[in-house]
Amino acid sequence: MTAETGNDTEDPREPITRAQVVLWDFDGPICRLFAGHSAERVARELVDWLSGRGLHGLLTEGERGAVDPHVVLRAVDRRHPGSDLLAELEERLTQEELRAVTTAMPTAYADPLIRTWKALGARLAVVTNNSPRTVQTYLESRTLLPCFAPHIYGRTQELRRLKPDPHFLNRALNAMGAAPETALMIGDTPSDFAAAREAEVPFLGYARNERKAKLLREAGATLVVESLEPVLRTVRGQA
């Protein structure tokens, strides 16, 4: 576990041991949703679907080459917010996510960490740009849904609410009656960090490789782990 702070004496375990509420991003910290179902292919299929309806020109060249389906979704939202087209595109992405659940790869140590934190009295929520239906389906498959329900906050057709907007985090905090300083968010992208910073929630970055760790640190994250194992060890130490 590493912490890059201006204070060499700061204990990186402190935000973990203090947390009464833990806000989890989904794709990354809990599982690799597209481990066996390429997100790049999904993005390409969304672009092809638009092209098949004569809407090729709706996207810029860069958007047509996107590897993240949310880039395509946001692009349509900017040009046709609240439209039937956007609703159908969002539903198509949700169906692709639901298919991906069957091959999703659990993040190492995530399941026992979730169960341990819950057993020790922490309250847990998911705050994600994925569909809440996708999250619920995955958690049910791992028998983890009782650890989170009903606190699953994710994508709707109001795409301006997606992270880095702090909307999902604020919804979770309000629903739980929790102050931001009593919480901890676990995320794996700069947009997760930006949302946590805006919501004034302490942030723990999870990076499964050095490239993702570098992106988080460059965004300003000061506590970054490349495995959840030391987090689990710290939480178990509170028992």
Image (cartoon, rainbow, N blue to C red):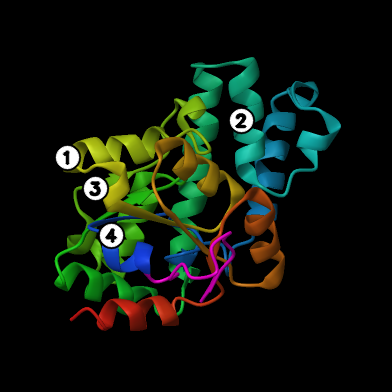
Q: Earlier in the sequence, mark 2 or mark 1?
A: 2
Residue 115 horizontal/vertical position (percent): 24, 73
User: Is residue 181 among what the camera can see?
Assistant: yes
Q: Nearer the viewer, residue 149 or 177?
A: 177
Q: Which residue is mark 3?
A: 151
Q: CA distance from mark 4 to mark 3?
A: 16 Å
Q: Is residue 225 above or below residue 73?
A: below
Q: Which residue is mark 2?
A: 74
Residue 177: give its label. 1
Q: Earlier in the sequence, mark 2 or mark 4?
A: 4
Q: CA distance from mark 3 to mark 1?
A: 12 Å
Q: CA distance from mark 1 to mark 4?
A: 14 Å
Residue 19: give its label. 4
Q: Residue 174, located in which quarter of the rendered image?
A: top left
Q: Is residue 76 above or below residue 226?
A: above
Crowd tier of the residue under label 3, counting other residues whose Cα lies within 10 Å: few below 14, some 14–19, many 20 or above: many
Residue 6 horizontal/vertical position (percent): 58, 59
Q: Is residue 224 above or below residue 228?
A: above
Describe the element under mark 2 as helix, strand or loop: helix
Q: Quadrant of the C terminus?
A: bottom left
Q: Residue 153, located in which quarter of the rendered image?
A: top left
Q: CA distance from mark 3 to mark 2?
A: 25 Å
Q: Nearer the viewer, mark 1 or mark 4?
A: 4
Magenta stretch? 1-13
